[in-house]
Image: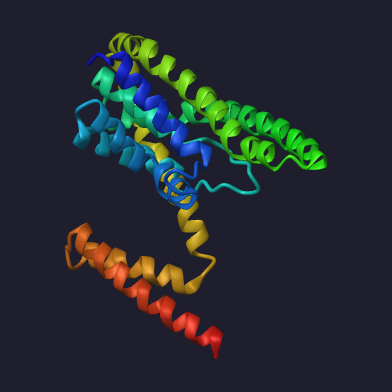
Amino acid sequence: MEINIIQAFLIGFLYFLCQSGTPWLGSAFIANYCRQPVVNGFIVGLILGHPVEGLIIGSAINLPFIGVILVGGTMPTDAALAGIVGTAFALASNASAAVAVAMAVPIGLLGNILLTTHMTKNSIFVHMMDQAAEEGNVKKMNSLNVWWPQITTMLLMTIPVMLVVYFGSDAAASVIQSLSGKPLQIITVIGGVLPAVGIALTLRMLLNKKATFLFYLLGLLMVSYFKLPMITIALFGIIIAYFYTELLMKKVED
């Protein structure tokens, strides 16, 4: 599959939306949903005309990153870049989901370079705002707080990802073809093991809270013994979470 320049731009712009915290779609939406590979993988697939394959690949990539959280503005790896570029490369090279996971993990580490540059760049505008505040120039403060950080972030995030996806998709396809056989089997096995790391990190957090672990155990039993589909279990989870939160908040108020 070839990725044209318009598709590459849309994929790069998607990364900007995922990482900028832009108020256009709401920072909470961006942080909690769009950054997850299962979501941005589907969107990348939609852009490339293969939404189902994008969702499958994004879901596989999401597993190693499921226990990764953003703490104090720092993170060990960039799940958004891993999901977006990993899915694009996998679709372009017709790679399996396991191979996509193996490709996405190192890509996620490279995302920290862009994030660090992004934060360093924004700190410049903070000092410029301090000077504008001393001058009493509210209009300039508003511009430095909203427009210029967003414009520069869009350029910083969109252009590198667009170029990587546009020029790198053919290279990724060539690499996958050259590794066919034993090397590709090894990469597939590694990609199959990596999701266990994300699941283990999540289980480690669940084990620290008895109530949360019991909910996880309930879902596991529903899958293993009752053979319920995931959508049904998710709906049960939403209902249980609603009543559990209501009872917990009522207890806090009392």
- From the viewer's perspective, tell me whether residue 155 is left or right of residue 139: left
Figure quadrant of the C terminus = bottom right
User: What is the x, y in percent for residue 26?
Assistant: 45, 49
The image quarter containing residue 13 is top left
- In the depicted view, which residue is nearer to us: 101 or 196? 101
- In the depicted view, which residue is nearer to us: 56 or 8? 8
User: What is the x, y in percent for residue 213?
Assistant: 43, 68
- From the viewer's perspective, tell me whether residue 126 is left or right of residue 161: right
Q: Residue at x 52, y 69 (%)?
A: 209
The image quarter containing residue 24 is top left
Figure quadrant of the N terminus = top left
Q: Residue at x 78, y 42 (%)?
A: 136
User: What is the x, y in percent for residue 186?
Assistant: 35, 24
Q: Is residue 188 visible?
A: no
- In the depicted view, which residue is nearer to us: 163 or 61? 163
Q: How is the image coloured?
A: rainbow
- In the depicted view, which residue is nearer to us: 50 or 7? 7
- From the viewer's perspective, tell me whether residue 126 is left or right of residue 31: right
Q: Residue at x 47, y 26 (%)?
A: 107
Specify the farthest residue to the bottom.
254
Q: What is the number of callouts on the image?
A: 0
User: Is the residue 164 above or below the residue 80 in the image?
Assistant: above
User: What is the x, y in percent for residue 156?
Assistant: 54, 23
Q: Is residue 108 visible?
A: yes
- From the viewer's perspective, tell me whether residue 131 is left or right of residue 84: right
Q: Residue at x 32, y 14 (%)?
A: 5
Specify the farthest residue to the right.
134
User: Is the residue 157 above or below the residue 173 in the image?
Assistant: below
